[in-house]
Amino acid sequence: MTATAPRLRTTASRSLTRLLLVMVALLGALFAGAVPASAHAALTGSDPKEGAVVATAPAQVALTFSEGVALDANSIRVLDPTGKRSDTAELVNLCSGDVVKYGVRLRTGIPNGTYTVAWQAISADSHPVSGAFTFSIGAPSATTAVVPTQAVGGGLVGALYGIARYAAYGGFVLLTGGAAFVLACWRRGATVGPVQRVVVGGWLTMTAATLAMLLLRTPYTGSGKLSDAFDLNGLRAVLETKPGAALISRLLLLGAAALFVSVLFGAYAKREDEAEKKDLTFGLSIGGAVVAAGLAATWALAEHASTGLQPGIAMPVDVLHLLAVATWLGGLVTLLVVLYRSPRIERAAVLRFSRIAFWSVAVLAATGVYQSWRQAGTWSALVDTAYGQLLLVKVGLVAVLVGTASVSRRWTARLSEHTAPEADAALVVEERASEPEPVTVPDDGKDAKRAAQLARQQAALSTAREKRIRDADPERTGLRRTVLAEAGIAVVLLAVTTVLTSTEPARTQEAVDKAKAGSQVAVADRPVDIRLPFDTGGQNGKGTVELTLDPGRTGSNDLRVSLEDPAGKPKDAPEVKVSFTLAAKSVGPLPVVPDRVTAGQWKASGVQIPMAGDWQISVTVRTSEIDETTVDKNVKIG
């Protein structure tokens, strides 16, 4: 018989339509009322600012972050132009109210030049962050300071940690979803080997991944060297942090989960009395739900949900979200394994899972909408940030997955409509009738080859028989195919979700961008050009100086100076100097000595204008040993 796709069921279509409409309404309401928040710490400001040129050495260097961070004495390092540390390695807590600000004091008597600030921290959601910037004292200079080119949390250690994180999620899905499938949908599954392997495999995967994350935590948030994974001092420090405590709690809960699994596939599977089995089912369901919620909470308490906007609401919502994902996707994988390895699963079990999957999707949609609003906040963030773009990919995958699931639900309905219990009985009779007679081979070692050949033949017959039983039900074949498609999409969805957990949320990225934009004044649309007459008072001391500052804004600029005599021809001079003064902020004068390029032409690169304002540009021209003059002009630099 050829399997044909069933027609849309009106009830299922209406239910799906209502669910989508509710999702759209919630998205509109939540995003319309979005308020600022953040998670995944980022640097939002510094004093001195990046690229600034200060006249004298500051007493300290201070950094402002978007959220709470964990720092130590080596988290902020200030390196002089030779690469030597210029701070006292004394961390100063400058936090006040909602402002997260830390600094380090500088040593006294440090020389002028360009200084490099390298920082590294662990954000409140457990992710390591780092960066570097420069500022100058007196005037910019060359620097040989070396900062790590690899971002913290990257490289081989970062890749291994990411794999372990993904495996932990996958193990949780299989463990929780597989056990829920047995207790809520198919109790007989506790005696089925493939189902047992799914659940036990999930437990083993999650346990191994958690141990790996615990060991890799030290190099992941620090040096990046794989050898540091076995540093006992580092491991001790990790255990004192919130992520370390969450991982240890997860291991303890996995111990309780091991007891649960042993009872489920031991005493529970062997219990034959229905009344006793019903009571044990209730007890296992309550205990399993508590352990599963505890495991989900180890993510909620240590990652994005634990910081930023409304953590008291976000953490339980995150637990519900993870449980809904595990129940749906873990049950889906278990069903797929059963359909391929144990073809005579009761139709009632498939129908029960279909209903549970529907409500899991409803919970997933509601909690997902809240999480999306919390981490994105605005519609523009969905397209302007990496987090928002990944979130759109996830939403698209969920939509495809829901569509595929609706087809599976219709195949499930066809199972109950077209296959009667008598058909199963007929298949069982056919299976038993086709079983070959057991072959007994004398144990004398002479017929070992013949015994192996017969064993292969019997295995082939058994495989063919199972395939014939599966293919005898075209509706079941269609269900297997759609469930397989669902499982494939689910794997991709889980990968995207894992990447999202390590991506800076859109709210934080927008907050950083706004902070940076707020620290800058509008940029001029053309370079600053000035022409000034001068007269040094000596012979041939008259002329005109022309100065160009390009691009004429805060930060780095190129300076060009040219001198002309009264006839308009290039005029050479023994010395030309320039200085910049911002009287309103008591900044300067900042001296610049341009290099002579050719007769009457001077040039300087990397001239730093630390902030916007009305600057006085002074040009000093010396035409002889004793003849010198300074001319100046005020210009607005944005």
Image (spheres, grey):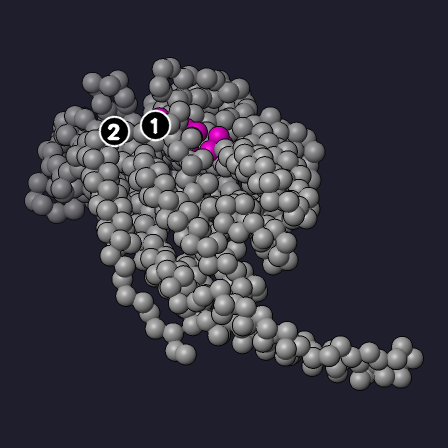
Nearest the viewer among 63 and 176 is 176
Q: Label 2 belongs to which residue?
A: 35
Horizontally, residue 24 falls left or right of residue 266, namely: left
Indicate yes or no whether the magenta region holds residue 573: no
Quadrant in the picture for residue 410: bottom left
Please, what is the three-letter code of the amino acid marked with disc 2? Val
At 50% from the left edge and 20% from the top edge, which residue is drawn? 91
Q: Earlier in the sequence, mark 1 or mark 2?
A: 2
Q: Residue furthest front?
A: 422
At 80% from the left edge and 84% from the top edge, which residue is drawn? 450
Q: Residue furthest top?
A: 96
Q: Above or below — where is 344 with respect to 289? A: below
Q: Above or below — where is 184 with respect to 30? A: below
Q: Label 1 belongs to which residue?
A: 309
Mark 1 in CB contact with mark 2 (< 8 angstroms):
yes
Q: Which residues fall within the magenta stretch?
A: 300-310
Please, what is the three-letter code of the amino acid marked with disc 1? Leu
Q: Main secondary structure of the magenta part?
A: loop
